Amino acid sequence: MHSNRARFLVALFAALCLLAFAVACSKGVDDEEDAEGGGGDSAEVANLTPYKPSGQEGSITGTINFTGAAPAPKGISMDADPVCASASPDAHAEDIVVNGDKLQNVLVYIKEGQLGGKSIKGFKFDPPAQPATLDQHGCHYVPHVQGVQVNQAFNVVNSDQTSHNVNVDAKLNDKFNQGQPPGAAPISKQFKREETVIPVKCNQHPWMRAYVGVLSHPFFAVTDKDGRFEIKNVPPGTYTVVAWHEKYPQGLTQSVTVGASEKKETNFSFSDQQLKAESLEGGALRALPALELPMLGAHR
Ligand SMILES: [Cu+2]
């Protein structure tokens, strides 16, 4: 009798332990989801100060240089889709476009900083009324790299006489993966959180790649064929400015102070040496998922 009671108590204790573990485990998942949520939560947005221009705005302009030997443009064969092949007979990859010694398709943006003694993250910037557009044109994405604002309309359109399937591989925002036949209506989405940078690919055409940087403010620009960029209407302040390129995912960073109505020239320089180093690092990082521990997967 006595030992039955002891066995019952041990079993009860074990059951309670299991229950406590299960609660802790599910709470852990909730906490992780909250942490991944980042900005954009309604309570945080309510605390933001609406941004109002003072009339003293300046700009950050500059050139992105490329030093060393520029990689030769890689040709793309679109023979797998005859519509693409006839639309773009002499197609080249856009993963690195160097004109002379200038680098195109670099996203330059303010990452953080202070304006009027307050963090830029403490302000709310209304998204532009104009939608951002990602066009599928000649079986390329146009533009190849772009910045959009949080909550700005983001339209994916198909200008081609073939079907595309846009695959937006967001990590902090909702990802989407959607087919779009010729003549179909635009796919209209919004990104709710900052995320630099979201890769986009086409499930139909493996050579198609684009990159979309989502920012909570309008202070970003992408370099043109001359490697030039201009970030307009920048309020006076001191900022961390990042130059991001898909071949240099770590980017380059500079501290930039913009005075009242000042046009601040800020140049960056990427090199072929960094390109090789980043490629090696990227290769090592890609091997990491093989090291994932099964226990961690089971816990989630
Ligand atoms: Cu496609």
Image (tube, grey):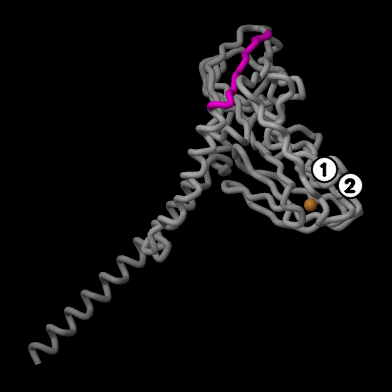
Q: Picture coordinates of residue 62 (x, y %)?
A: 67, 15
Circle 1: element type: strand
Image side of residue 189 versus residue 17, left or right: right
Q: Picture coordinates of residue 154 (x, y %)?
A: 76, 43
Q: Find the magenta span and give its range.
A: 263-273
Mark sitting on residue 159: 2
40 shown above or below 48: below
Q: Verify whether residue 32 appears in magenta.
A: no
2 shown above or below 205: below
Image side of residue 1 versus residue 44, left or right: left
Q: Picture coordinates of residue 84 (x, y %)?
A: 86, 50
Q: Main secondary structure of the magenta part?
A: strand
Q: Which amino acid type corresponds to the residue marked 1 in the rendered image?
A: Asp
Taking depth in this image into account, of 185 and 197 the one nearest to the observer is: 197
92 shown above or below 296: above
Q: Picture coordinates of residue 38 (x, y %)?
A: 52, 42
Mark sitting on residue 135: 1
Q: Residues within 10 Å of mark 2 (few under 14, many from 20)?
A: some
Residue drawn at point x = 71 percent, y = 26 percent: 98
Residue drawn at point x = 57 percent, y = 22 percent: 241
Residue farthest to the bottom? 1
Tag 2 and tag 1, C-beta contact below 8 Å: yes
Image side of residue 60 versus residue 89, left or right: left
Q: Residues within 10 Å of mark 1 (few under 14, many from 20)?
A: some
Residue drawn at point x = 15 percent, y = 84 percent: 7
The C terminus: image quadrant: bottom left
Q: CA distance from mark 2 to mark 1?
A: 7 Å
Q: Which amino acid type corresponds to the residue marked 2 in the rendered image?
A: Ser
